[in-house]
Image (spheres, rainbow, N blue to C red):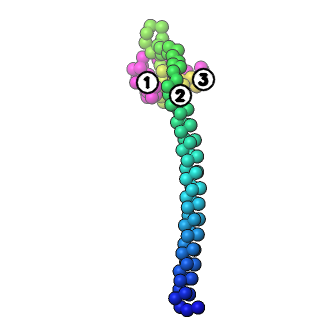
Amino acid sequence: MNQQEHNTIISFQRARADIMKLKEEIYALQHQQSSIVATISVLQEHNTILIERLKAPQKVTLNAPVAKKTNGNGKKTFVASKTATKFHIKNCPFAQNIKPKSNIIFKTKNSALNKGFKPCKCIQ
């Protein structure tokens, strides 16, 4: 076998190896493509469901009217604890935790301020 035939055989072997690598890469790309198509299909189904939910009429629930935080004459009632430094509106969650025996009631905001109490965040 002469040098030219030997070089031709090596060239064909390299070409064959390159073709095999390309076939493997094409197979991997096809696999990735099918995975992407499946993911797109699932996403389209989710999108359809979400669009249907958005188009469906929403149930609107009206909140019950909020009771005004006032005493009988239309003014707010303020409370504080004997051991605390802040005063609250009577319906404040912090005011609900004050024990009845240590509860101080103020009819006005100024009376609580004059006694040295600071307003809670519930007081505007």
> Which amino acid type is marked by label 2?
Arg
Q: Which residues are magenta?
A: 100-124
19 vs 109, nearest the viewer: 19
Residue on which disc 3 sits: 99
User: Nearer the viewer's eye, disc 3 or disc 2?
Assistant: 2
At 45% from the left and 28% from the top, the residue drawn is: 121
Q: Which residue is mark 2?
A: 53
Mark 2 and mark 1: span between their CA atoms? 40 Å
Work out whether mark 3 precedes mark 2 in sequence or the reverse, and give the earlier one: 2
Q: Residue at x 59, y 65 (%)?
A: 24
Q: CA distance from mark 3 to mark 1?
A: 20 Å
Query: Relative to residue 38, is residue 91 depicted above or below?
Result: above
Compared with 19, 79 (above or below) is: above
**Local secondary structure at mark 3:** loop
Q: Mark 3: give few (<14), some (14-19) or many (20+) Cα within 10 Å.
A: few
Amino acid tagged 3: Lys
Tell me the quadrant of the picture where the C terminus can be found: top left
Which of the 4 image quadrants contains residue 15? bottom right
Q: Position of residue 46 (x, y in %)?
A: 55, 37
Q: Residue at x 43, y 12 (%)?
A: 75
Please tell me whether residue 79 belongs to the stretch shown in magenta.
no
Comparing 101 with 61, the one in front is 61
Q: Residues within 10 Å of mark 2 (few under 14, many from 20)?
A: few
Residue at image position (45%, 15%) is 76
Question: Residue 123 appears in which quarter of the rendering?
Answer: top left
Which residue in the structure is indicated by mark 1? 123
